[in-house]
Image (spheres, rainbow, N blue to C red):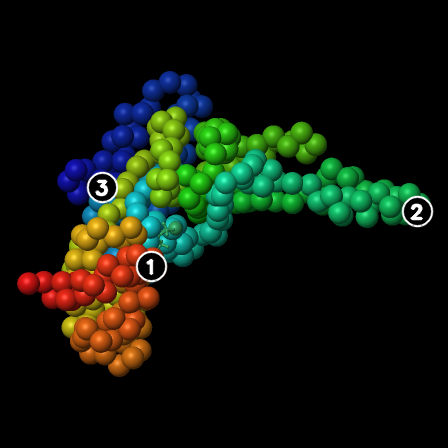
Amino acid sequence: MGGSELSPTWIEDRRQQSRTGTDNDHDDRQGRLLMGALPFESVEELQAVLGRYAYLADRGLATAVWLSLALNKPLLLEGEAGVGKTEVAKVLSELLDRRLVRLQCYEGIDASQALYEWDYSRQLIAVRAAQLGEHEADLFGPDFLVERPLLAAIRAGSQAVLLIDELDRADDEFEAFLLEVLSEFAVTIPEIGRVAAERPPAVIITSNRTRELHDALKRRCLYHWIDHPSVEREVDIVRVRAPEVPEVLARQVARAVARLRAMDVAKRPGVAETIDWSQALAFLGAERLEPDTASATLGALVKDHEDLELVRAKLDEVLEPE
Ligand SMILES: Nc1ncnc2c1ncn2[C@@H]1O[C@H](COP(=O)(O)OP(=O)(O)OP(=O)(O)O)[C@@H](O)[C@H]1O
Ligand SMILES: [Mg+2]
């Protein structure tokens, strides 16, 4: 897709084309195409702004993020560990100056932990107080409602970036519930009423693919797979995130990590590990990647016993190929 196709004119054309149906439909669609509200005009500009916030995205990722914001569709990011999925949401909340609302998924997470709960201990105290003749509280009123991330995001609406992190860890039932929330951005709390977002928040969903997510959820989202960065990009990332690391060292580290990722290791190191390793080496005063210091600091890069043994045995190959 060429840059010109993503210009405001392109979006405006799409908006014109979508002017069918009832007036309500029309208003709704207009509300969804938020171009005017975005502080950047093109993918290139977003890519540059991300860079200023120390996130170096390639063109594909920048396009996916830009479209997700412009079309108000959740962005599903998949990729191996440590490729920068979660960081996208964090950086986005900073650069858009919006609140980051994070829903960390885990096995067994359920709707109440994600949406809202009633504060039982406070309710109990209020009941006791009422029994003692003190003022009677509305036990199921807003004062006793504990807001969880999804409700917080619905309330904050377009003032928030909602990060639904590691959705693959949650079970199918939770995913189905989430699907409902994502299509409506509204929730009915029986005791209080309906809470709806006037404009939905930006939504980033991440998954490490420990299981496939359902097609129904994917259909609601734009999808982007984040790969390990190229050596050049990884050097730049290290330089941006750890400016104290000499350039020669950063380059040698990035090349070594790329070779290591191509080996038969159980866990391929992510970008975070590349940064950690570079920092550890620089902290020890290394200007270049030497076998002794490399071996002594490998624990910053490789976090698996068998992998460590394998890498130590093939260290020459990792540092300098034949
Ligand atoms: N493109 C990038 N630009 C700048 N820094 C990056 C980039 N990608 C990764 N990083 C660095 O790597 C770190 C790890 O990234 P992040 O936690 O987002 O990975 P992840 O894909 O969510 O990993 P996991 O699957 O383990 O949760 C970030 O804190 C950041 O320092
Ligand atoms: Mg993550």
- Give the crowd class for mark 2: few <14, some 14-19, many >=20 residues within 10 Å: few
Disc 3 versus disc 1: nearer the observer: 1
- Asked if the residue under mark 3 is in contact with the one under mark 2, i.e. CB atoms within 8 Å, the reply is no
Residue type at the position of mark 1:
His
The residue drawn where x is 42% and y is 29% is: 28
Circle on res. 305 = 1
Assess mark 1: CB under 8 A from ligand 1? no
How far, Cα to Cα, is label 2 from label 3?
66 Å
How far, Cα to Cα, is label 3 from label 1?
50 Å
Residue 173 percent coordinates (x, y): 50, 29
Sequence-earlier tag: 1 or 2: 2
Q: Which residue is mark 3?
A: 7
The residue drawn where x is 32% and y is 35% is: 222
- Residue 313: image quadrant is bottom left
For ligand 1, which image quadrant applies? bottom left
* Quadrant of image for the C terminus: bottom left
Sequence-earlier tag: 2 or 3: 3
- Residue 49: image quadrant is bottom left
Residue type at the position of mark 3:
Ser
Q: Which residue is mark 2?
A: 132
Sequence-earlier tag: 3 or 1: 3
Is residue 194 in view? Answer: yes
Disc 2 versus disc 3: nearer the observer: 2
- Horizontal relation, residue 201 to residue 243: left or right: right
Residue type at the position of mark 2:
Leu
- Residue 5: image quadrant is top left
